[in-house]
Structures are given as structure tokens and as C-alpha cells.
Amino acid sequence: LYLKELEIFLPGTVLEGTISSSLRVSGAPGAKTASMNLAGRDLVYDDVVIGALNLDASHKGERLRANLTTGRLSPEPLNDIKATASIPLRINWSPPRYFIPDNQPISVSCSSDHLSAGVLELLLPFFDTAEGTIPAKLTVSGTTPDPDISFNTTLKDTEITVTPTETV
């Protein structure tokens, strides 16, 4: 799928690149397994270069496992996100429902050595411009529903402009 074709659903957004995906659900009722792959090439969202994307996920029993990589390698590394997750997830396929059961172990790790500061413009609309690199690491560990969440980052050669707000 060419992402440009999705711009009709997101007016004012510039999308570039291609994505492909597959989903396989198999097994008897009450014992289904699922696997999914999402792959992307040359991805760009507005001015933020994502590069390649690969997401592999599987669900069996009450556990969702996933691995994600993104990034562009040349001319220099950019948005090189690596993530793994093991999340408790109960899925009923018919009728479709899902929920995260309590008191189950959860583990998520997500890191990037070369995360573009431009990502902040996408996540935080009050940032006018953001340039530079933000090495970052996010971890989630413990048990549901109250796991420990840790986020560490460093601003490296970063410039950020914040949109002024009105004072009352």
C-alpha cells in the first residue's frame, strides 16, 4: 500500500513510503493463535523520516509478544527504534472483545540512540520546531494493572521552539 493513498483520511498530512501486512488467525474456538507482520519502506510522516519499519507480533493463550524495529541507516542513523514487549492480553474472537487481565507480568522495552527531535512536534502540538537528536529508553515492568514505568532521555545538540500561549 502506498501511504500517499491514505492522505485523503488525514487532510493536511504528508505521507510517503509503502507498507505491507499480514494477519493469520488459526485454531479451534477458545484456543486460537494469531500472528501479524507489518513492514514498511521509506516511511515519512510530515517532515519526520521514519525509514524502515518491521513489526512482528504473536498472540497465544493470554500473551501478546511483539518485536519492533524502525529507522533509517544512511547517510547516518535516524529514528532507530528497537522495542520488545510481552503483554498479558485476553482476546475473545467472537464476539470481538479484549482486555488486559490483572496481576499478570508485563515487560516492554523501547529504545533509540538516534531519535529525531522532530518526533516531539508530532507528539506535542505546542512545539513549533524541534531539531537534533534525543537518545531515549522506555521500560515497563512488573505486573498489571500498576507496572513500573521508566523513561530516560538526553537532549543532544537539540533546539526546540515552543508556541507561545495566551495569558489571561
Image (cartoon, rainbow, N blue to C red):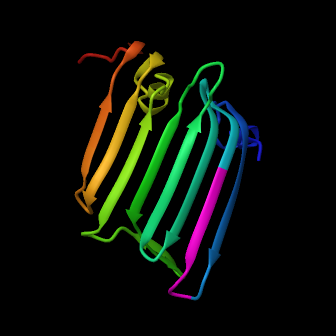
Span shown in magenta: 29-38
**Is residue 126 positioned above or below 111 on the image?**
above
Residue at (47% x, 25% y) in the render: 121
**Is residue 119 positioned above or below 25 on the image?**
above
With 141 as the anchor, is 157 left or right in this view? right
x and y percent of residue 62 in the render? Answer: 42, 74
| Residue 50 is covered by the magenta coloring | no
Residue at (36% x, 67% y) in the render: 100
x and y percent of residue 112 in the render? Answer: 45, 33
User: Is residue 33 visible in this depiction of the protein?
Assistant: yes
**Is residue 19 positioned above or below 130 on the image?**
below
Q: Nearer the viewer, residue 166 or 13?
A: 13
Tell me which secondary structure the magenta stretch mostly adopts: strand
**Is residue 75 positioned above or below 152 on the image?**
above
Q: How many marks?
A: 0
x and y percent of residue 68 in the render? Answer: 53, 48
x and y percent of residue 8 in the render? Answer: 71, 41
Q: Quadrant of residue 36?
A: bottom right
User: Is residue 159 visible in this depiction of the protein?
Assistant: no
Residue at (55% x, 43% y) in the render: 69
Residue at (60% x, 84% y) in the render: 27
Q: Quadrant of residue 93?
A: bottom right
